[in-house]
């Protein structure tokens, strides 16, 4: 009976401490030596971003979101699908016009190509200080071998091979010539031209997939290089980290030019699809494992120094509101950066904005969209995570930790990202609210060397109570459909980056607690001793 009472009492204490999130708090001891040897730390994760298809870049909401992300990251280039879609209007060999009440007639003076929208699209990016990462897709309907061969996205892109490669070659040639004439070869030579998108999935209708894609690549790369050898071209732009070894071997064997290798992976891709195994790879490991796999394939290829660009990645390839909308993204991003550093030249986060229509017109701001900003320009926790991680320096200090990343900057600052990773509260298209009992917090006991023992410290946070618009959206009852202007205003305020806390080291020590799904950035200022 005494044992039973003691057990019941212990269970009660466990329940109480569980409720306040203290019962399982762990402490990690971290030593940061600013005098230690460092390694270069280029910000490979924040220089390219994906976005909705090309025509959406003409919307003001898209450009507003681009400006927001540009202001808090090192955004340099944007990649989108569909620069050759009919809605952009490039290829129309039978251009017709029709005035009201009159019969259709051939457009006078019209050529095969119309660059009007393409110019507006690229002019808009460049005016914002952003270059295009040019994905060459999809097939103009009047050029397709099968114009009815479409992919299932809302805008139904035609994915057929061309009916005649002479038509494709001529369009690629005219496209490249026009870009150089408008922007100059010195500018265009800084852009990356990627042939197609995910030809190993339903985005490419050629059969068999691989050899027919290689034919498309060969024609495209040779046409571009014939215009100017300085144009950078690459592929295979595959899903699930596929084809890269075969692609590079093909280019070598057939003497086809290639300047970079590109591929994609998402954290919920399966081991069966990426590695052809039956492993259960967790969401916080999949992207790193795939990047490492392709990095090693390139090292063993005929081009061991070939630049590698992961031109799409994210924590999910589907709309999962407990993943891409929530504070889960902070620890996931930071850990992914820690793991992938040194393995790839650049990684393009999919996407910077939920001005996006692959699944149709957006109906609610928090549906698990891929963007850093939800509809109506509402910042998500992921935007704040990117803004915080942007503050990391360009020299990495080695740490023996899977929950911390330390850097230093030329101005004497030392930056440390700390996180408390846990799986998302729910998966799939349905939203699962956070549990009423908080998860275990993680305590970091930090010792600094090579900085002033009482240096000023800034602490930036994104977690359930900092920079988290979803908490406010939940409190509103997750309203369906369009929001009122007042609701938008409230959500923007709730999602804004929280101002930093200011404190000081105490005899070179700092202790900080990070809640579950929390990300913190420690910025140690002041002159070094």
Image: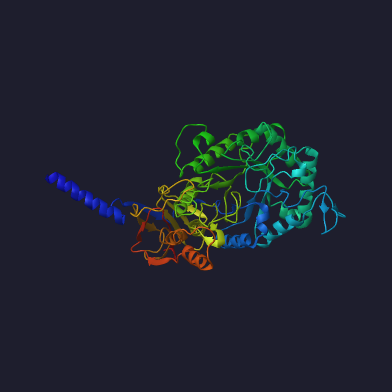
Residue 393 vertical placement versus 294 (above, below): below
How many numbered marks appear? 0
**260 and 474: which one is in front?**
474
Q: Quadrant of the C terminus?
A: bottom left
**238 and 82: which one is in front?**
82
**108 and 403: which one is in front?**
108
| Residue 114 percent across, percent down from the top left | 79, 53
Q: Residue furthest front?
A: 101
Q: Residue at x 72, y 59 (%)?
A: 120
Q: Residue at x 61, y 63 (%)?
A: 64
- Is any atom of residue 226 visible in this view? yes
| Residue 523 percent across, percent down from the top left | 44, 62
| Residue 261 percent across, percent down from the top left | 63, 41
Type of colouring: rainbow
Q: Residue at x 83, y 58 (%)?
A: 101
Classify residue 195 by image quadrant: top right
Q: Quadrant of the N terminus?
A: top left
**18 and 505: which one is in front?**
18
Q: Residue furthest left?
A: 1
| Residue 432 percent across, percent down from the top left | 42, 50
102 sits to left or right of 435: right
85 sits to left or right of 339: right
Residue 172 vertical placement versus 434 (above, below): above
- Is any atom of residue 37 visible in this view? no
Q: Residue at x 71, y 59 (%)?
A: 123
């Amino acid at each position: 009976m005494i044992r039973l009472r003691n057990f019941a009492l212990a269970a009660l204490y466990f329940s109480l401490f569980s409720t306040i999130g203290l019962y399982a708090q762990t402490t990690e001891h971290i030593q940061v030596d600013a005098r230690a040897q460092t390694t270069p730390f280029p910000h490979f994760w924040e220089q390219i971003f994906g976005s909705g298809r090309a025509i959406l870049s003409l919307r003001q909401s898209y450009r507003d979101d681009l400006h927001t992300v540009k202001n808090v990251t090192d955004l340099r280039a944007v990649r989108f699908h569909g620069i050759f879609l009919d809605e952009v209007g490039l290829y129309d060999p039978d251009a017709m016009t029709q005035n009201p009440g009159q019969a259709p007639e051939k457009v006078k003076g019209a050529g095969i190509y119309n660059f009007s929208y393409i110019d507006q699209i690229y002019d808009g990016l460049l005016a914002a200080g952003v270059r295009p990462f040019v994905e060459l897709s999809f097939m103009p309907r009047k050029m397709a071998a099968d114009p009815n061969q479409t992919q299932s996205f809302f805008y139904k892109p035609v994915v057929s091979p061309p009916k005649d490669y002479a038509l494709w070659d001529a369009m690629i040639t005219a496209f490249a010539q026009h870009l150089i004439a408008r922007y100059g070869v010195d500018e265009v030579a800084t852009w990356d031209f990627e042939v197609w998108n995910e030809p190993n999935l339903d985005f490419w209708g050629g059969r068999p997939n691989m050899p027919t894609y290689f034919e498309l690549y060969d024609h495209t790369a040779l046409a571009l290089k014939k215009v100017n050898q300085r144009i950078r071209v690459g592929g295979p732009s595959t899903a699930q980290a596929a084809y890269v070894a075969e692609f590079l071997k093909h280019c070598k064997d057939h003497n086809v030019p290639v300047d970079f290798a590109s591929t994609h992976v998402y954290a919920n891709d399966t081991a069966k699809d990426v590695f052809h195994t039956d492993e259960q790879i967790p969401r916080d490991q999949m992207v790193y494992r795939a990047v490492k796999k392709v990095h090693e394939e390139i090292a063993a290829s005929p081009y061991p120094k070939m630049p590698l660009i992961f031109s799409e990645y994210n924590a999910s390839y589907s709309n999962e509101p407990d993943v891409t909308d929530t504070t889960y993204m902070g620890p996931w991003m930071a850990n992914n950066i820690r793991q992938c550093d040194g393995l790839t030249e650049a990684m393009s986060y999919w996407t910077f904005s939920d001005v996006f229509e692959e699944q149709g017109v957006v109906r609610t701001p928090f549906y698990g969209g891929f963007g850093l900003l939800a509809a109506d320009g509402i910042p998500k926790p992921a935007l704040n995570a990117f803004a915080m991680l942007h503050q990391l320096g360009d020299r990495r200090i080695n740490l023996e930790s899977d929950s911390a990343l330390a850097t230093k900057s030329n101005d004497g600052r030392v930056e440390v990202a700390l996180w408390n990773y846990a799986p998302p509260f729910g998966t799939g298209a349905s939203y699962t609210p956070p549990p009423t009992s908080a998860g275990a917090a993680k305590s970091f006991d930090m010792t600094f060397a090579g900085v002033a023992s009482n240096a000023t410290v800034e602490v930036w946070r994104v977690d359930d109570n900092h920079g988290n618009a979803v908490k406010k959206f939940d409190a509103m009852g997750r309203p369906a459909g369009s929001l009122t202007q007042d609701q938008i205003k409230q959500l923007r305020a709730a999602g804004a980056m929280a101002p930093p806390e200011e404190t000081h080291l105490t005899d070179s020590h700092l202790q900080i607690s990070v809640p579950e799904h929390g990300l913190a950035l420690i910025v140690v200022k002041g002159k070094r001793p």
